[in-house]
Amino acid sequence: MGGQVAIDVCAGCQAFWFDHFESLKLSPGSTLKLMKFIGEHPSSAKPSPPGTMQCPRCATTLKLAHDLQGNMPFTYWRCATDDGHFIAFLEFLKEKNFIHRLTPGQIQELRQNVQFVNCSSCGASINLETDSACPYCHAPITMLDMKQPQLMLEQLRRAAEPKPLDPTLPLKVASAKMALETSLADYDRGTEWWSNASCFGLVGAGLTVVARWLSDKLVD
Ligand SMILES: [Zn+2]
Ligand SMILES: [Zn+2]
């Protein structure tokens, strides 16, 4: 908030490196920008991090850390001397409270539309006829909360009046109609959405939609 933050990103590893506690200081605009980046760099195969990783700053071995966002566990790799942390895209989205478990009702609804979805955690195919969690990594079936980016954008829009709060990410305020006239819900559930869901998982499908939706709303 208020300052500049440099974030290292690797689309191949599907992960970010944040120096110190940069992640905590992200403005809504920066968070949306990272979300857009993630959506624009989908990967059907989930790269697993190597067994040991070294801190890019002090070269000590990074330690796996477990944390909770509400009831959603997430993990990251942290430097013991607090140089920073390495966090996978999906874990970052969990940390920011963008990822929710499907309710039994939502799983039922999903079943009526597709038989297979990709596990958002490990990339394995989940047969919805028989499974309501990933049979391989046991992760619950999760999806992107489509309301969250809308709320953040609304927050940004308010903050942009009368002048932009976040100069690195000016909104296309000129189009005042950017008020949520195109609701994310309208994009949901197209044919393309279902094919993305079976290929990239529900989170990936949601991200593709959100990235496209955001690209009309945010200046690059
Ligand atoms: Zn270090
Ligand atoms: Zn899995």
Image: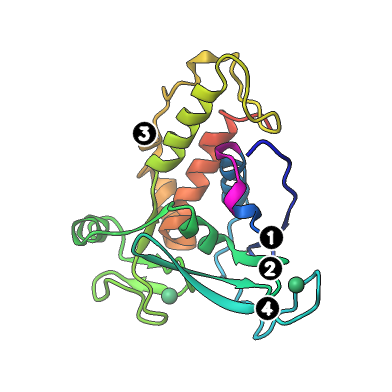
Write down the residue under mark 1.
20
Queried on whether the Cβ of the residue with tag 4 lies below 8 angstroms from ligand 1, the answer reads: yes
Distance CA(mark 2)–CA(mark 3): 43 Å
Q: Residues within 10 Å of mark 1 (few under 14, many from 20)?
A: some
The reply to whether discs 2 and 3 touch (Cβ–Cβ < 8 Å) is no
The reply to whether discs 1 and 3 touch (Cβ–Cβ < 8 Å) is no
The amino acid pointed to by label 1 is His
Question: N-terminal of the two: label 1 or label 4?
Answer: 1
Task: Please tell me whether mark 2 or mark 4 is closer to you in this view.
Answer: 2
Q: Residues within 10 Å of mark 4 (few under 14, many from 20)?
A: many
Distance CA(mark 3)–CA(mark 4): 42 Å
Asked if residue 215 is positioned above or below residue 97 in the image, the reply reads above
- Secondary structure beneath dot 4 equals loop
Distance CA(mark 1)–CA(mark 4): 13 Å
The amino acid pointed to by label 3 is Asp
Question: N-terminal of the two: label 2 or label 4?
Answer: 4
- Secondary structure beneath dot 2 equals loop
Q: Which mark is residue 82?
A: 2
| Range of magenta residues | 24-29
Task: Please tell me whether mark 3 or mark 4 is closer to you in this view.
Answer: 4
- Residue drawn at the location 20% of the way across and 62% of the way down: 104
Question: N-terminal of the two: label 2 or label 1?
Answer: 1
Write down the residue under mark 4.
62
